[in-house]
Image (cartoon, rainbow, N blue to C red):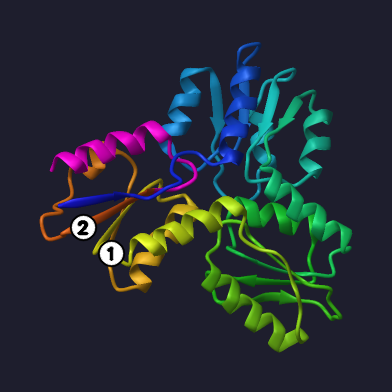
Amino acid sequence: MKTILVQPYGYCFGVLRAQRIALQEAEKEPIYCLGSLVHNESAIEELARHGIKTLKEKGPNLAPLLSLAPKGSTILFSAHGHDRTLEKEATSRGLFYLDATCPYVQANIELGLNHQGKVAYIGSKGHAEAEAFLANVHPAAFYDVKAERIDYAKPGPLEGIIAQTTLDEEDIEFGKIAIEKEYGSLPLLAGRCPATKKRQEAVESALQEADCLIVLGSKTSSNSARLLSLAKKKGKAGYLVLDLSELRTLDLSAYATIALCSGASTAKEEVERCYAYLSSC
């Protein structure tokens, strides 16, 4: 069995930045992360070992979690973005806060605000990044890739379209077509982030040779799910596993060539352990 290690792999820039912010502050005092800092259970466990407590979200509304942090403690906003009104609410509760929002996610929010919300947004309803954009920008229209429809729409004219950074090109294209049926031709102002685009293109290239794709990532990770969907769209076998222990449970004897890739929230070291295991099979 041949194994192709798809590159780049490991944490993306946004995740590395978020972890650095969290770990540096955790050396001084306990940190309470409002929702998952990143969508990977192993990464969350590692943060916990450094004294970073994750206040787990039960839905898109993160405000109730603020009451779980002791007065005077520090709240960490995750890489996925957040409703900025939570910053004022945290301060009013006697909490300090740090912002680990991914720069690409932040740039999309700023872009939407610069256009005064006269934009359509393509995203996955319920995903933290999409919910943060909707809460801050209040776009004129929202195309939900889960339901494959415009979830709500206001009268135009609009100035362009912005997409969630972790989507794949096909989802964005379907959303753009649906939005333009409603509003006419519009420019795509911002789409996939460079890291997402590069990983997806590398996976598509590897799938030209491989007959099976293994994605290392969490089932809660949007970008990992998108990588897995690339295999299914090409009629290839695909598996999404969190780590080496899950990988070992798979029967891969039917495949001649396997492509191994990772979501943006999977550690480089875990990818390399899995690659070593597959190479020895």
Residue 145 seen anywhere in this rendered image of the structure: no
- Place of residue 147 in the rendered image (x, y in percent of width and height, measured from the top left): 54, 74
Q: Name the dominant secondary structure of the magenta segment.
A: helix
Q: Secondary structure at mark 2?
A: strand
Above or below: residue 183 compared with residue 5: below
Front in this rendered view, residue 249 or 275: 275
Magenta span includes 227: no
The residue drawn where x is 85% and y is 80% is: 156
Extreme residue toward the top, this view: 28
Dot 2 or dot 1, earlier in sequence: 1
Kindly identify the amino acid type of the residue bearing the numbered disc 1.
Answer: Glu
Where does the magenta region start and end?
262-281
- Place of residue 131 in the rendered image (x, y in percent of width and height, measured from the top left): 66, 55
* Mark 1 Cα-neighbour bin, 10 Å: few <14, some 14–19, many ≥20: few
Residue 33 seen anywhere in this rendered image of the structure: yes
Above or below: residue 77 compared with residue 263: above
The residue drawn where x is 15% and y is 59% is: 256
Q: CA distance from mark 2 to mark 1?
A: 7 Å
Q: Which mark is residue 69?
A: none
The residue drawn where x is 47% and y is 59% is: 200
Kindly identify the amino acid type of the residue bearing the numbered disc 2.
Answer: Thr
- Are dots 2 and 1 in contact, CB under 8 Å? yes
Magenta span includes 273: yes
Q: Quadrant of the C terminus?
A: top left
Q: Which mark is residue 257?
A: 2
- Place of residue 53 in the rendered image (x, y in percent of width and height, measured from the top left): 55, 25
